Image: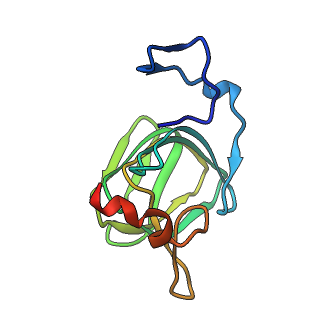
């Protein structure tokens, strides 16, 4: 497992890893208005924890949560813009989790800051029928190995 921050004196016996998000840069994603700080990432299993920051009006397009996804909203709100739970809003100080296989379009009408935990990266459905991950890679090529994890 790895975090984006360098390892140093704050790592004890390879068991505890201190991550300082305030010392990390926000990374742009391929989705306008969406930035991330990856706190933990395990390439083998797909486990990822990230701080996500959304500009007002930012949208995460049609995607499926391959496994359980958890989000704690620190600031702003996260709204299901489309999908079976259309209109549900998770506000600052609230927590929402989604079951494996859930699919929706997420929206931050006033912007937001949240802590997100993914067991496996989301599948994003492109207009041309391709299925990609958040980085734009073919999902099956990048993450198909996690089906047996």
The residue depicted at 47 percent of the width and 37 percent of the height is: 1
At horizontal 62% and vertical 17% (from top left) the residue drawn is: 8
**Nearest to the observer: residue 107 or residue 30:** 30
Q: Residue 34: x, y in percent?
A: 64, 54
- Foreground pick, 23 / 11: 11
Q: Position of residue 6 (x, y in %)?
A: 64, 27
User: Is residue 39 in view?
Assistant: yes
Single out the residue that lies furthest toward the bottom.
128
Q: Residue 72, located in which quarter of the rendered image?
A: top left
Colour mapping used in the image? rainbow
Q: Is residue 57 above or below residue 70?
A: below
- Residue 82 vs 2, above or below: the answer is below
How far across and down, in percent of the image, does residue 119 sit?
A: 36, 50
Position of residue 60 relative to residue 15, above or below, is: below
Q: Is residue 101 left or right of residue 4?
A: left
Taking depth in this image into account, of 110 and 101 the one nearest to the observer is: 101
Res. 65 in view: no
Which of 102/78 is in front?
Answer: 102
Question: With respect to residue 18, does 82 lie above or below?
Answer: below
Quarter of the rendering occupied by the C terminus:
bottom left
């Amino acid at each position: 497992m790895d975090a984006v921050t360098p390892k140093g004196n704050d790592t004890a016996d390879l068991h505890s890893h201190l991550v300082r998000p305030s010392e990390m840069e926000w990374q742009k994603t391929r989705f306008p208005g969406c930035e991330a700080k990856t706190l933990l990432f395990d390439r083998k299993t797909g486990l990822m924890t990230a701080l996500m920051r959304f500009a007002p009006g930012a949208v995460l397009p049609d995607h499926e949560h391959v496994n359980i996804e958890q989000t704690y909203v620190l600031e702003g709100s996260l709204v299901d813009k489309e999908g079976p739970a259309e209109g549900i809003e998770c506000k600052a100080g609230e927590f929402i989790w989604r079951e494996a296989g859930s699919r929706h379009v997420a929206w931050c009408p006033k912007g937001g800051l949240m802590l997100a935990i993914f067991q496996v990266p989301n599948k994003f459905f492109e207009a041309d029928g391709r299925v990609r991950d958040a980085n734009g890679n073919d999902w099956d090529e990048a993450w198909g190995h996690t089906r047996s994890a």
